[in-house]
Image: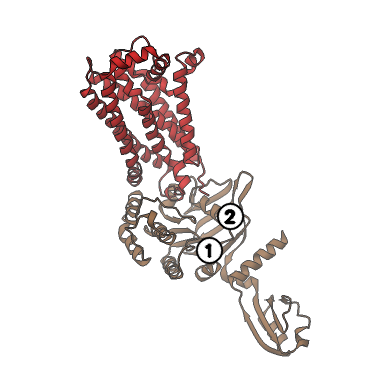
Chain colours: A brown, B red
Amino acid sequence: MSIIVTESLTRTYGRRRGIDSVSLRVSEGALFGFLGPNGAGKTTAIRVMVGLLRPSAGTARIFGLDCWRYSDSVKAEVGYMPGDLRLHAWMDGNQALRIWEKVRRRDLLPYGRDLAQRFDLDLTVKVRRMSRGMRQKLGLILALAHKPRLLILDEPTVTLDPLMQAAVHRLLREMAAAGHTVFFSSHTLGEVEQLCDRVAVIREGRLVADESLDALRQRAGHQVTIRWRDNAAASAEPPPFLKIEPPNGLVWSGMLNGPVDQFIAWLAHRPVDDMSISRPDLETLFRSYYASQGSGS
Amino acid sequence: MNRGLMLKAVVEIRTSTLLCGGLLCGVEAILAYVLPTFQAQFSENLRQIRFLQTFFSAMLGVDASEQFGPEAFMAFPWVHPVVLALVWAHALVCCTRLPAGEIEQGTADVTFTLPVTRWEILRSETAVWLAASLTVMAMILLGNTVGGSYAVAAEHAEGARTLIVLANLWCLHLAVGGLSWLVSALSNRRGVAITVAFVLLLASFLLNYLAQFWEFAKRIAFLGLLDYYRPLVILRDGIMPWRDMAILLMAAILLWTAAGVVFTRRDVCTT
């Protein structure tokens, strides 16, 4: 079952582009990564989903409900943390949780305090005295305290230290394992790679990919590095299924677009000193996506 | 109405309410004591300086040049520029917090993504604002009563008439609040919202002033909110200004409703 469905979702700001015909489906229990560089349209899409912006065209539905028209019902089961998080300066964590529990009409304090312990956050400190990282932790606690069915996080770990990032990642994995859906945007590719089972890539407001991480990697082929034993082999013409970057002495590196056994058979009778073959990391995929889309446009 | 949002609103406006209320209580007490006590000296000054007469009349909303009697001096504490400025300031500060203030400080992303409708947000905020407004009115009454009780004057304002003036001032306060909600709903910057609302109020004040000696201004004076606030007439005649109060309340309701319609339909973008 799809928790988030957007169809041809478009949002413009006057003449300025926000997002253009974004169609997405996020299934229940997924850990979904929404990738794109700054200004690509990630935050605009998220703002439409949480009812802050009205779509210019197309639809956005969460739990089958229109995100603008039934925004309050949708948000009852959504936990949201904005990218550029600002909290009311006069609040401390306890006050915030008390207000949130009255707004949501749920008992949030026990789990909120558990989360604070887990994130090592003192709930008695006023927001105005908190560091950015502390505010980010409080934002996460407020988004998570009601154990939402869907968690929407806009670059959630950007100001957290590596240890805290790992704690957040663990928690998100636990939530997904318990059947909660996590939709989060990021431009930190390693984070998405560690966490997500499915990603969408947005570029200049348009969706350029929406598939599982494995499928994305499959499609992208393999990363290959070969160290030749002699110059003759290094200066030979590469086969059509190997796309090699400009050679660097005896080393070739590039992408294999074809079956691995074909490559090994081709390599078997050649003077190879060393060789590695691997799936590309998301960073490489992302760059190749952007490079190819950029050259295509 | 949402209790959580009301609690948040209480925390956010209690300081400005107590501050404005305290100041108004003090200023009102001083004016209610000084003006009737030193009525003879003030009357002499007013007779000699024409500009002061016009100013006095403009503040009172009626031509008072012929009758600077005790009622005029009892009415002046209710229309003194400091009193009006503080009453306006309270309304402007409280009613531009949302949405303009929330958008400007970036907290709208958090507040407006809570699971409540925007109407419910506005209703919750308004309920707290009404309570704050009544608190301010109570403090004004306290100041006026205390100051008036120490005043050395031949006549004192009747309690019932004073309460009617207070009711009229409350209606004016609500109308200014409604105007502030609307301007705030149309804006992303609280400073801009406050400035626009203040300029409109100042225009109303000037219109009231100019109407004393300019026929054209007199003809369009009905457009200003201050045209419906006349403490002198109430204190002098003891008549309940139903029409004026109804117009101010109607303006408050219409402006607030328009604010709600704009707020529920608008995009919220903090970046």
In the image, taking residue A9 as reference, residue B232 lies left or right, namely: left
First-in-chain label (2 vs 1): 1
Badge 2: chain ID: A
For marks 2 and 1, give the CA distance: 14 Å
Residue B94 point in image, percent of width and height? 39, 38
Evaluate whether label 2 is on the same chain as label 1.
Answer: yes
Of residues A143 and B18, the one nearer the viewer is B18
Nearer to us: label 2 or label 1: 2
Quadrant for the C terminus of chain A, please.
bottom right
Task: Examine the image and state in which quarter residue A279 appears.
Answer: bottom right
Residue A247 point in image, percent of width and height? 73, 79
Instruction: Classify 10 Å Cα crowding around label 1: few (below 14), some (14-19), many (20 and above).
Output: many
The residue beneath circle 1 is A33
The residue lying at 39 percent from left, 54 percent from top is A128
The residue beneath circle 2 is A41
Residue type (three-letter) at the residue carrying disc 1? Gly
In the image, taking residue A229 as reference, residue A43 lies left or right, namely: left
The residue lying at 78 percent from left, 83 percent from top is A236
Q: Can residue B239 be seen in this view?
A: no
The residue lying at 50 percent from left, 52 percent from top is A49
Badge 1: chain ID: A
Local secondary structure at mark 1: strand
Residue type (three-letter) at the residue carrying disc 2? Gly
Q: Is residue B268 visible?
A: yes
Of residues A145 and A85, the one nearer the viewer is A85
Q: Is label 2 in contact with label 1 (beta carbons under 8 Å)?
A: no
Residue B19 point in image, percent of width and height? 32, 38
In the picture shown, does residue B88 fall above or below A289? above
